[in-house]
Image: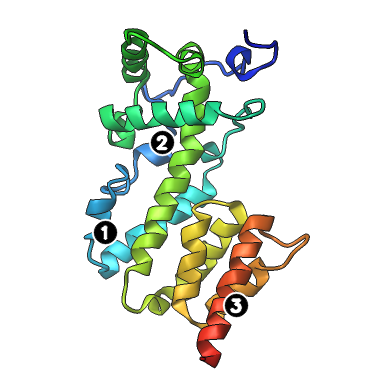
Amino acid sequence: MSEPGSEETWDPRVARWHDPEGDYVLPRTLRTLPQPWDAGDWNRIAELPRTEERLAEARRVVTVLLEDPALSPHVPRPPAPGLLWHAWEEFHRAVGESMPRTSDVTWSGVDELVRAWQDRPQLYPLQRHVVRHVEAAMLALIPTLRDDIADSVFRWLALDPDPGRFAEWAVELAERCVTEDIGADSALELLGAMRTSKARAALQRLSAKPNGPATWQNAEAAQSILFDLDSDATGP
């Protein structure tokens, strides 16, 4: 039996929201991202040439992800032990499979997925929670997509043989993303791969703790990257 207040009985109190432009679930910023950034298809993204046009596009993508407050809604935090996040992620994967582009995600499509889950021969308690409170799962999808898209931009930039050539504009965006904890792992890796004084200065600022601009975990990661850079510089 579930105890009162457990994840299975938790009420996130998230009401369904309505977009003035239609049956859309996701904010307009996500719906209007250029392809292939709007679909999270890493295989396609990795093959993109780093032309001036594509680089400018990637810069705009990260900028709008940082600047639109609609992409950082307050998502109620499930009670301990937090296993509901895994059920949400499972539903998010189902959303991505049935509605691969951000502009495809509609409440009609979400409700169809809910019915498909309800028709399963067996649902676990946390999966039933998703079905009952699908709005909470979809609200959590918004910052998840923001994080995944920013992550893919920084990973794509880091594939370049000389990512330091992007330092003039990418360092600031990467530093802001680490501070906001948006695609932070890949942003930090890009800063390390740039190997420029500007990128190193950003890593030093991000590594400050306690009371630094980044989370403790991201500050630790920045310190680790700085250590590796120093080790490479001094050699064996």
Q: Where does the image place residue 25, in percent across and percent down from the top left?
A: 41, 26
In this rendered view, identify the residue nearer to me: 98 or 78: 78
Q: Amino acid at mark 3?
A: Phe
- Tag 3, which secondary structure? helix
- Nearer-the-camera pick, 101 or 158: 158
Please give the name of the residue rendered at 58% of the width and 15% of the height, measured from the top-left corner.
8
Residue at which label 3 appears: 227
Q: Label 2 sits on what residue type?
A: Arg
Q: Where is the N terminus found, in terms of image quarters? A: top right
Give the spatial CA distance, label 2 vs label 3: 41 Å
Q: In what element is the residue under mark 1?
A: helix
**Residue 69 vs residue 225, the one in the foreground:** 225
Q: Nearer the viewer, mark 3 or mark 1?
A: 3
Label disc, if present, on residue 46 of the rendered structure: 1
Q: Earlier in the sequence, mark 3 or mark 1?
A: 1
What crowding class fits label 1: few (fewer than 14 Cα within 10 Å), some (14-19), or many (20 or more)? some
Q: Earlier in the sequence, mark 2 or mark 1?
A: 2
Residue 32, horizontal then vertical, whole percent: 34, 41
**Label 1 is placed on what type of residue?**
Ala
The disc label shown at residue 28, or none = 2
Q: Is residue 33 above or below residue 159?
A: above
Q: For the residues labelled 2 and 3, say whether their Cβ atoms are less than 8 Å apart.
A: no
Residue at position x 66%, y 68% in the image: 207
